[in-house]
Every structure is written in structure tokens, then in C-alpha cells.
Amino acid sequence: MKKLIDVYPYKIKNGVPLFLIFRRSEKKIYANQWRMVGGKVKDGETRWEAGLRELKEETGLQPVAFWTLPSINQFYEAKTDMIYAIPAFGAEVDEDAEIQLDEEHTEYQWVGIEEVETFIPWPEQRRLMKLTYDILTDQFLEILPEWKIELA
């Protein structure tokens, strides 16, 4: 079974999280859909290492903070009869970071939480973006030390 990861890149602008989303190339799986960073875990790689690698490959970015969301993206794929449980990561990037798209994507944009439903068709991805937003903005929530991944 293939191991997958999701990464939800965001920046904080004027105290508000904005999410980085990408339109998939028509030549790739999920053609023309707006999505976050995602990919497969390579042999010998941890899931969080795969998340960092995929973020770098798809955007050219290194995060200033990287953390495990306290939830997973789950879905059933009928074609393979597989149930996937995909770890998800939050990746804060510098507000002025320059995005470098790879061949998997044709464009990108920053969206606020109120725009997510307009772009993201997958309910679990919407839910995880909302969870990320809530952790970043709710005065009673915070990124717990156990979720943080130390960057070298």
C-alpha cells in the first residue's frame, strides 16, 4: 500500500492565516483541481520527511514552522479497495516567500479560510484546513510542543 502525506502551507498576514493552494496540471492525477501539497512517502523516509520534501519540490519553500496536525485525512478508494489514513502537516512559510511551481501545477494562490470551500473539492481537506485555521486563531488552542517538528 502506498504511503501518502498532506501538507497545508500557510502564511500569517496581518495576524490572519492564508493558505497556499495549487491548480493541478491537466496531465496529472486530480487534473485541474485546486489542492494543497501532497505526495508519496519514499522508501526509508518518514512521513514528516516526505512532507518537507514534497513542500520543497512543489513550491521551492522551506517552512519557518512545521508541525503535525492532530488529525488525519481519511478516504476510501474504490478502484483499489483501499482505505487511506494520511498524516497531515501544517507548514508556516515566510510571508514574502517566492513560490516556484513544479510541473505538477499550473498556478497558485493564497486564500483565506472563507474561500476554501470555493476552491477545495475534497471535504477532508477542507476540514483539515479549517482545523489548521482554528489552531492558529482560537485563543484556547495552540500548536502543542508534541506536534512540532524540529527543523535543522
Image (cartoon, helix red, strand yellow):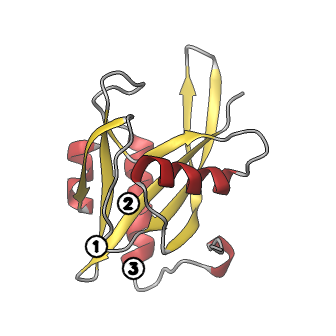
Query: Residue at the bottom extreme?
Result: 139
Q: Which residue is mark 3?
A: 138
Q: Which residue is mark 1?
A: 96
The answer to whether residue 125 is above or below residue 40 is below
Quadrant occupied by the C terminus = bottom right
Tag 1 or tag 2, which sits nearer the N-term? 1
The answer to whether residue 57 is above or below residue 98 is above
Of badges 3 and 1, the one in the foreground is 1
Quadrant occupied by the N terminus = top right
Of badges 2 and 1, the one in the foreground is 1
Q: What kind of residue is marked 3? A: Asp
Query: Residue at the top extreme?
Result: 79
Residue drawn at x 68%, y 75% as measured from the top left: 146
Q: What kind of residue is marked 2? A: Lys
Q: Nearer the viewer, residue 137 or 38?
A: 38
Q: Residue 23's spot in the image, x, y percent?
A: 28, 39
Classify mark 3: residues with Cα within 10 Å, few (<14), some (14-19) or many (20+). few
Left or right for 114, reference 89: left
Q: What kind of residue is marked 1? A: Asp
The answer to whether residue 80 is above or below residue 72 is above
Q: Residue 110's spot in the image, x, y percent?
A: 24, 58
Left or right for 81, reference 122: right
Classify mark 2: residues with Cα within 10 Å, few (<14), some (14-19) or many (20+). some
Q: Nearer the viewer, residue 95 or 70?
A: 95
Q: Which residue is mark 2?
A: 130
Q: Residue 89's spot in the image, x, y percent?
A: 54, 59
The answer to whether the residue labelled 2 contacts the one labelled 3, judged by CB atoms less than 8 Å apart, is: no
Residue drawn at x 32%, y 29% as measured from the top left: 25
- Check disc 3 and report its element: helix, strand or loop: loop
Query: Residue at the right extreme?
Result: 44
- Check disc 2 and report its element: helix, strand or loop: helix
